[in-house]
């Protein structure tokens, strides 16, 4: 597909600086730009590339002031990063959608399938399950009994959704993810034996949720594990039984949340964060990568870092001392020896 800069600027409500008739037919990183490509500059660290890039057009913030001549046509917008995201969304939506049901798909007679769906090869859909209009289920997806998938949701290859689980409208679930596997519930019977506790609840995923690849979200012991609307989960995340993740919270890769914890809305959790079970994390909490939340977070909108996680300014002050601890220890030990020697005299 090919667009003029004038068309793109009109869509983004941007201001053109240069030739409005320049045509672009692809999108490229600013450092890898070439003729016919559109790039963007939002991070000042990449400013050097705007003077050498071969891209035909570049999205920049309205307040960007170049220090050298820029050969590309500029489209000035309020927020270049958000504008670029909007543009990518437009390109994605312009792609033709797959439709139809592959002849190797297995769909139980009691299942209900909506209009204009795509159901790929070797998909299985269980009894009494509902697949909404405009959904896409890619090859090898497994949908258990009594599952509901809302309208316009996309489920990529090899996703497994166990029985009784609910997925809302406009959700995206990436390859290899498992929704509704048993929670980790075992009751000790003796020093060496455990009895499995049946997990009879389900998982509820509300509207506009995106779940990355190879994520595991466990079904609840009773009730529901709930992923509220607008949540975005990265790849390789573990969500345990009876967890509740609040609206519009984002969680980066390799993080884990233990059972029955409630994470508030509008939280941001960095990569490899661990959150213990049976606590509440307040709305708006931001947690730095590799941190461990070991107790309830009551105050909203805090930024936490470390193991155990503490307010980030405290953590930075403490981490500045860490490298000096061996020397401090040697000095303290030497002082103790001197004091002990003086006491003996």
Image: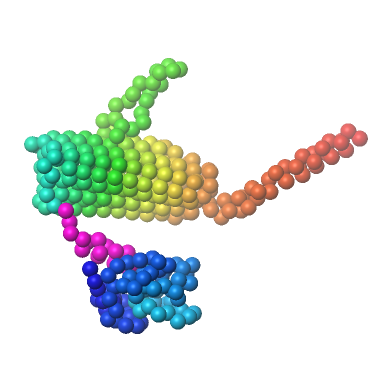
Magenta part of the chain: 82-98
**In-image side of 99 versus 25 (left or right):** left
Q: Which residue is pictured at 68% across the width and 45% down the height?
A: 325
| Residue 33 x %, y % | 38, 69
Q: Is residue 319 above or below residue 80?
A: above
- In the rendered view, does 52 fall on the left or right side of 205? right
Q: Position of residue 152 (x, y in %)?
A: 19, 53
Query: On screen, 257 above or below 135?
Result: above
The outermost residue toward the left is 109
Q: Quadrant of the N terminus?
A: bottom left
Find residue 255 and report its horizontal and vertical position in percent: 42, 44
Residue at 40%, 41% (x, y): give it.
257
Residue at 29 percent of width and 79 percent of height? 22
**Does 298 sit left or right of 131 as displayed?**
right
Residues 108 and 129: in front is 108
Q: Nearer the viewer, residue 30 or 322?
A: 30
Residue 83: within the magenta? Answer: yes
Q: What is the quadrant of residue 334 in the picture? A: top right
Residue 85 visible in the snapshot: yes
Q: Looking at the rendering, in which quadrant would you find the C terminus?
A: top right
Whether residue 184 is situated above or below residue 6 in the rendered picture:
above
């Amino acid at each position: 597909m090919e667009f003029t800069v004038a068309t793109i600027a009109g869509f983004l409500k941007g201001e053109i600086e240069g030739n409005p008739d320049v045509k672009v037919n692809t999108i490229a990183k600013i450092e890898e730009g070439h003729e016919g490509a559109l790039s963007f500059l939002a991070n000042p660290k990449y400013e050097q590339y705007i003077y050498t890039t071969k891209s035909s057009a570049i999205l920049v913030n309205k307040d960007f002031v170049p220090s050298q001549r820029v050969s590309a046509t500029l489209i000035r917008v309020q927020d270049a990063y958000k504008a670029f995201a909007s543009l990518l969304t437009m390109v994605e939506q312009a792609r033709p959608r797959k439709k139809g049901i592959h002849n190797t798909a297995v769909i139980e007679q009691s299942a209900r399938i909506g209009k204009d769906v795509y159901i790929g090869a070797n998909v299985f859909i269980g009894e009494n399950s509902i697949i909404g209009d405009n959904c896409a289920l890619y090859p090898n997806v497994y949908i258990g009994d009594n599952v509901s998938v809302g309208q316009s949701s996309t489920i990529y290859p090899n996703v497994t959704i166990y029985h009784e689980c609910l997925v809302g409208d406009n959700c995206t679930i990436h390859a290899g993810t498992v929704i509704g596997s048993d929670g980790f519930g075992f009751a000790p019977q003796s020093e060496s034996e455990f009895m499995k506790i049946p997990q009879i609840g389900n998982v509820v995923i509300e509207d506009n949720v995106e779940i990355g690849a190879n994520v595991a979200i466990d079904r609840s012991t009773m009730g529901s594990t709930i992923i509220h609307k607008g949540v975005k989960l990265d790849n390789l995340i573990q969500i345990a039984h009876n967890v509740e993740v609040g609206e519009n919270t984002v969680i980066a890769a390799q993080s884990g949340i233990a059972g029955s914890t409630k994470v508030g809305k509008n939280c941001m959790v960095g990569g490899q964060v661990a959150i213990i079970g049976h606590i509440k994390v307040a709305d708006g909490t931001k947690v730095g990568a590799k941190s461990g939340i070991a107790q309830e977070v009551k105050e909203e909108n805090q930024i936490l870092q470390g193991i155990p996680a503490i307010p980030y300014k405290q953590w930075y002050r403490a981490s500045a001392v860490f490298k000096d601890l061996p020397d401090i220890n040697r000095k303290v030990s030497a002082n103790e020896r001197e004091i002990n020697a003086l006491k003996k005299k």
